Image (cartoon, rainbow, N blue to C red):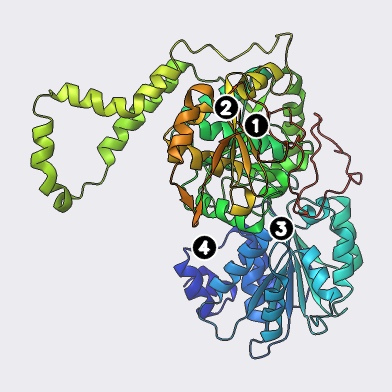
Amino acid sequence: MNPFLELGIRHEVVNAITELGFEKPSEIQEKAIPVLLTGNDDFVGLAQTGTGKTAAFGLPLLEQLDFSQKHPQALVLCPTRELCLQIAKDLEKYAKYIDNVNVVAVYGGANISDQLRQIRRGVQIVVATPGRMLDIIGRKAIDFSQVNYVVLDEADEMLNMGFQEDINNILSETPDTKKTWLFSATMPTEVRRIAKNYMTDPVEMTVGTKNTGNANIEHNYYLIRAKDKYAAFKRIVDSNPEIFGIVFCRTKIETQEIAEALIKDGYNADSLHGDLSQQQRDKVMKRYRDRSLQLLIATDVAARGIDVNNVTHVINFSLPDEIENYTHRSGRTARAGKTGISISLINLKEQSKIRHLEKVIGKSFERKEVPQGSAVVEKQLLTIVDKVQNVAINEEQINQFLPAIMEGFESLSKEDIVKRFASLEFNRFLEYYKDAPDLNIDARDTGRGDRDFDRGERRERGGSKGFTRLFMNLGSVDEFNRGEILGFICNTTKISGKSIGKIDLKGVYTFFEVQDADVDKVIQGFKGVDFNGRNVRIEVSGEGGSSDRGGRSRSGGGERSGRSRFGGSAGGERRSGGERKERSSGGFRDFSGKRRESKSKY
C-alpha cells in the first residue's frame, strides 16, 4: 500500500503526487500529516528548508477544505514572492485530480488588479506575502471571516524581514476559532511569541536538532587572502565542471559585479537581487531552473524562497552578517534527500566565524586547499574525455554526414583528431592557468593586506585607462540588466567580454566602456541592428574614457552617479521597494536571540 495512503491522504491526491515523484514521506511529512489531518490542533513544526514542508501542510489542507464553496478557507503566509508562487504551484499540482480547487498567489511586484480579479472569481486557498496581503485587506477586497486554517511558512524568515506587525494585523482579521500551523527552520523569541499569542496548546514537532543544518550537506572552507578571493573562486568553479550552484554575497552591488565579471570570463552566470523587477527576476529564475545558467549570484533577501532541485554547491563569497542566514543559505542544496556542498571563502580574520558556525550548527567544517592550476587543467581535460565517451549519438541523423566528416579528417591521425577536439575547450584553460600561483595561505600568516576584495584589484579590473566610453539608446526599460546588456554587446559585435569595462545602465540608455582598440568594431557591429523594431544607436560619449575621439554625451552633459567600490553604479539605480542597502560590516551579529534590526519588506 502507498505510504501516503496509509497516512490518510485520499487517492486523487496520492495519484497526483506519485506523478510528481513522491515515493515515501519525508520525516516532517510523516510526523506532521497525521496530526494535521485531525484538524483539531494548532501546530508548530521545526524543520530545515528542503525537507518537504510544503507537502507537510499542503496535503492535509486539501483534505480539510470544502471545494464546493468559493470563499477563502485557508491562508498561507510566506516571506517572498518566489516562495509564494512556488507554494501556490505546488498546491495546484497536488490538487490536479480534485475538482473546483482555486488557489490564488498574492504578492508584491505584480499587478494587484489581476490578483483582486482572481479573488472575486472565488478562491479557497490564498497564498500571500504579508505586505501585499495587508494591502488587499486595506482595500476591503477579501473576507477572511470563514477562514479555518492559517499557515505561517518560514516564520523565522518573515520576522527577520520585518513582517511581525503585518502578521499581527493579518491574523487579527481571521476568526479566533481558526487553527494555526506554523513552520520554521529556527525558533527565535519572536516566533515563540507568535505561537504564544495566536495558538492554543500547539502540538510541537522538531525534525533534526533546532538551528542545525541538513545532515547531507558537506561544509568546506578555503583560507585565502582577500585580494585573491575572485581568482580562488574561479579556480574552485573550474575544478567542479558540473557545478550548478548559488553564490551568496552581502550586497546588491557585489552580486552585480561578480556576475558581470563571470560573464566577461565566459561563465553562464547572472545576478538576483532586490532591485530587479518581478519580470526580470522571473526571467533569471527561469534560466536558472532550465539550467542555462550554471551560477546564480544572489543576496540573502533575494534568494529566500528559492526552491530549485539538484543545486550541487552553495558558495559563500562573503559570510553572512547573521548566523541564521548561513543555515538558510546552505539549505538551498541537499534538498529532497540529496547531498550537497556548502563552501565558504574566508580570510585570516574570519577563521573565528567558522569556529562559531561549527558550534552553533553542530557540524565540522573541513578546510580545503585551493586547487593548483595544473590540477584544474587536468580536471577539465578529464571532463572533456568523459563527455566524449558518454555523448548520445543519433546514428540515423549523423550517418548522412559521415562521408564528408571522414574525408575532412583523412589527413589526420587518430592522435591528431583527439588533440584537436580536446583543444577546442582546453586551450583557454591551458592559457589561463599557465604559471598560475598558489593561492593558499598558512593559517599562521599575519594577514597583511587582507581586506574584503582588495581595492587595488578592483581598480585594475574596473578602471577606465585604455577604454572609451560609449552611449547606447537601450536601458533597463528594455528589460536589460547589466549582465544581459553585456551579453547583447558581445554577441552582436563578436568581441570578448574582457574588452568591456564599466557598464552604467540607466532607464532608457546605457553608458559602457570598450577598450580603445575595439571601439570601431563595436560601432560597426551595431550598424543596421535593431531591437524590438528600434534602431540601436551607438555613439562615443564625451564623458570619461581615455579616448580623444570626441562626440557628445547623450545624457545632457552626463550623469555623475556615485561609484561603488566595485566600479559599478551606486547611485541613480532604481529601487523597486525591495531590498534596503545591506550592511557590509564583518562579524556575525546577535547570537543572543535579542531583537535584531528589522530588514525591509522584500
Which of the two residues, 6 or 559, is positioned nearer the viewer here? 559
Using the image, determine if residue 260 lies above or below residue 600: above
Q: How crowded is mark 4: few (under 14 residues within 10 Å), some or many (20 or more)?
A: few
Q: Are marks 4 and 3 in contact (CB under 8 Å)?
A: no
Question: Mark 4 — residue?
Answer: 24
Question: Mark 2 — residue?
Answer: 233
Q: In which quarter of the image is residue 432?
A: top left
Which kind of residue does numbered mark 3 sit on? Thr
Q: How far is disc 4 from disc 3 in space, using C-alphas? A: 28 Å
Q: In this view, does 138 lie to the left or right of 31?
A: right
Whichever of callouts 3 and 2 sits on the residue coming sooner in the sequence is 3
SS under mark 4: loop
Which x, y percent locates residue 451?
74, 19
Q: Do the residues labelled 1 and 2 touch (CB within 8 Å)?
A: yes
SS under mark 2: helix
Mark 4 vs mark 2: give the one in front: 2
Using the image, determine if residue 578 lies above or below residue 465: below
Q: Residues within 10 Å of mark 3 (few under 14, many from 20)?
A: many
